[in-house]
Image: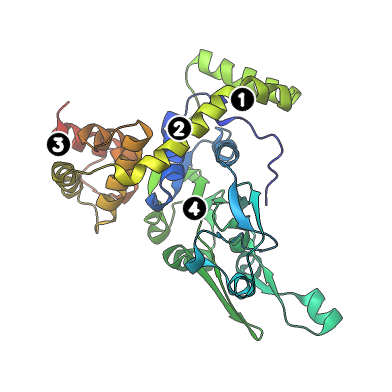
């Protein structure tokens, strides 16, 4: 698990507006399905993930639970917490939203958990040693170079992401525990493509590019240098903006269930997906959820075409079929379809 000691402030990240917006939307509504940030190295992808987690308010957890069970969701408690609940009130505490790195060389045992060999050898007891999925529960699982992830780990992640539960049955162990997390992936498309099955699991996909204009590049260097020289002082300068952003996220989460999606907006989303030839209905679902989260974040009560227009490239660019007769990139194709659907 990564350290949460004085992360770079989310509000201080220069540019990368599409990436920051995508992260804010999944913070408001995790059911959107995670974010894939593809692009140049050294553009702040991992910095933004850690900054977002630190920006979010602390969560209530059950004390000493390795999965950080949510006491407000009894149906999602692990077996041990349900057993403890049967004999009395669960001890509670506040904890930061977890951010867990998944290294490229991670073994399956490290990811899903395995037999605690030390305990087995010392006491003869079979005990479960939780893996990365356990630590990521209710937080973010960050996969750098997601396009280089081994196939068997991709299959494993797909199963867990679909069910929200990790099931481990090996070496005489039979363990089930909650594993609901927001999947964040990053990578460089020049180093290989992502498997379609995993690509489709990301709700939003953003393109992250190195700033081209000189003033932006200078500002990035100045802020990063100031942060590294005195992280605490730099964080204090941005504290008020961070608190304002945190309050905006909390307000948006509370407002979200009451934001309506008119039939006309649903029809616009469906027409856009049909025009682009996206497979299945996950495109429409993600598009509507992201547009609703955007409306909520902006303090509006209804989702409209302007929200679809803004979020469509991120929600649909990674769902397009290859068209050998169209050399335009996926982003250009989405923007072209948006112009045809909603006007220039």
Q: In the structure shown, which secondary structural element does the residue marked by tag 4 occupy?
A: strand
Q: Which mark is residue 239?
A: 1
Vertical comparison of 263 with 336: above or below: below
| Residue 145 seen anywhere in this rendered image of the structure | yes
Whole-percent x and y of residue 284? 25, 50
Name the residue beneath numbered marker 4. Answer: 183
From the viewer's side, name the closer residue of 130 and 190: 130
Discs 2/4, front: 2
Separation (CA) of disc 1 from disc 2 = 14 Å
Could you tell me which residue is drawn at 62 percent across and 52 percent down?
100
Separation (CA) of disc 3 from disc 2 = 31 Å
Whole-percent x and y of residue 319? 31, 50
Q: Are discs 1 and 2 less than 8 Å apart at CB?
A: no
Separation (CA) of disc 3 from disc 1 = 41 Å
| Residue 208 seen anywhere in this rendered image of the structure | no
Name the residue beneath numbered marker 3. Answer: 341
């Amino acid at each position: 698990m990564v350290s949460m000691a004085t992360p770079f402030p989310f509000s201080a990240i220069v540019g990368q507006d599409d990436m920051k917006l995508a992260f804010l939307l999944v913070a408001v509504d995790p059911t959107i399905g995670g974010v894939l940030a593809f692009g140049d190295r050294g553009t702040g992808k991992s910095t933004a993930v850690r900054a977002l987690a630190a920006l979010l308010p602390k969560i209530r957890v059950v004390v000493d639970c390795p999965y950080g069970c949510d006491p407000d969701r009894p149906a999602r408690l692990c077996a041990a917490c349900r057993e403890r609940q049967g004999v009395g009130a669960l001890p509670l505490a506040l904890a930061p939203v977890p951010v867990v790195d998944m290294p490229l060389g991670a073994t399956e045992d490290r990811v899903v958990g395995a037999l605690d060999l030390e305990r087995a050898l010392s006491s003869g007891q079979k005990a479960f040693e939780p893996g990365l999925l356990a630590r990521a529960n209710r937080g973010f699982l960050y996969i750098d170079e997601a396009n280089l992830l081994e196939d068997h780990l991709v299959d494993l992640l797909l199963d867990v992401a679909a069910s929200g539960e990790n099931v481990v049955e090996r070496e005489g162990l039979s363990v089930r525990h909650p594993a609901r997390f927001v999947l964040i992936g990053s990578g460089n498309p020049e180093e290989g493509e992502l498997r379609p099955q995993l690509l489709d699991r990301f709700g939003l996909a953003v393109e992250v590019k190195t700033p081209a204009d000189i003033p932006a590049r200078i500002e990035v260097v100045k802020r990063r240098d100031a942060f590294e020289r005195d992280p605490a002082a730099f964080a204090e300068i941005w504290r008020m903006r961070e608190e304002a952003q945190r309050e905006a996220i909390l307000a948006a989460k509370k407002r979200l269930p009451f934001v309506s999606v008119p039939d006309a907006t649903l029809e616009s989303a469906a027409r856009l997906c049909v025009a682009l030839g996206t497979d299945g209905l996950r495109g429409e679902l993600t598009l509507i959820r992201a547009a609703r989260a955007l409306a909520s974040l902006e303090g509006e009560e209804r989702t409209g075409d302007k929200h679809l227009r803004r979020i469509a490239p991120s929600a649909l660019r990674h769902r397009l079929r290859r068209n050998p007769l169209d050399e335009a990139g996926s982003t250009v194709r989405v923007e072209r379809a948006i112009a045809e659907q909603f006007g220039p």
